[in-house]
Amino acid sequence: ILDSAMGYYIKAADIFILSKDSVQLEKAYRNTAIVLSSTGNAKKSLKYRLLSLNIARDLKDNDAIGGNLLGLGNLKLDESSWDSANYYFELADSCFMLSENVRGRIWTQNNLANSAYYSGNHEEAQKHFLLSKDLAIQMKDSNEILSLIHISEPTRPLYISYAVFCLKK
């Protein structure tokens, strides 16, 4: 299924190149990068991520820029390159702040927390998880509050309890 999805995104990109539709071309490249990353093809994913990022910058689309920076950070997270991952996550967070995209900020804060946790900095992880939790509550979005259940140890039990408490409200 992922291979056929990737094929459709690449075909769509060809159409968008011909029609000079930069907005849709950026999305096609970004979706191609996501599929490639999901299938473990980080090198090709990086290529499409950078193509998408360059178009997003030309369009001055902070949400698309942030999404691509988040994707680049995740590629670095997969490589255990914590500092590089954090660099991209912080840039993504700045973009999402500019566009007032709270959900994007939740995603970046969760990723910053994961990076800190896996690199052994549990205090920093907790700081980012708390910010993510506060943003999710601000949105009053039960799906985002539920995402707290995916939080890693050692903070996980506390936030699972909190997520359940929020959902019962």
Image (cartoon, rainbow, N blue to C red):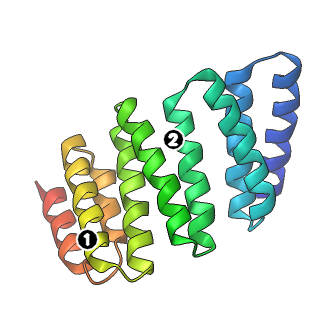
Residue 126, labelled with which disc? 1
Query: Residue at horizontal 69%, vertical 30%?
Result: 55
Q: Nearer the viewer, residue 164 or 76?
A: 76
Asked if residue 98 is positioned above or below residue 79 in the image, the reply reads above
Asked if residue 123 is positioned above or below residue 37 in the image, the reply reads below
Q: Residue furthest top?
A: 19
Residue type pointed to by label 2: Gly
Quarter holding the N terminus is bottom right
Which numbered disc flags the more N-terminal residue, 2 or 1?
2
CA neighbours of label 2 inside 10 A, class few (<14), some (14 to 19), many (20+):
many
Question: Is the residue under label 1 in contact with that under label 2 (CB below 8 Å)?
Answer: no
Image position, residue 45 (x, y; %) = 75, 55
Q: Residue furthest left?
A: 169
CA neighbours of label 1 inside 10 A, class few (<14), some (14 to 19), many (20+):
many
In which quadrant of the rendered view does residue 60 lie?
Answer: top right
Camera sees residue 155? yes
Asked if residue 79 is positioned above or below residue 107 in the image, the reply reads below
Q: On the picture, is 135 further left or further right than 19?
A: left
Q: Which residue is mark 2?
A: 66
Query: Which secondary structure lies at badge 1?
Result: helix
In which quadrant of the rendered view does residue 116 lie?
Answer: bottom left
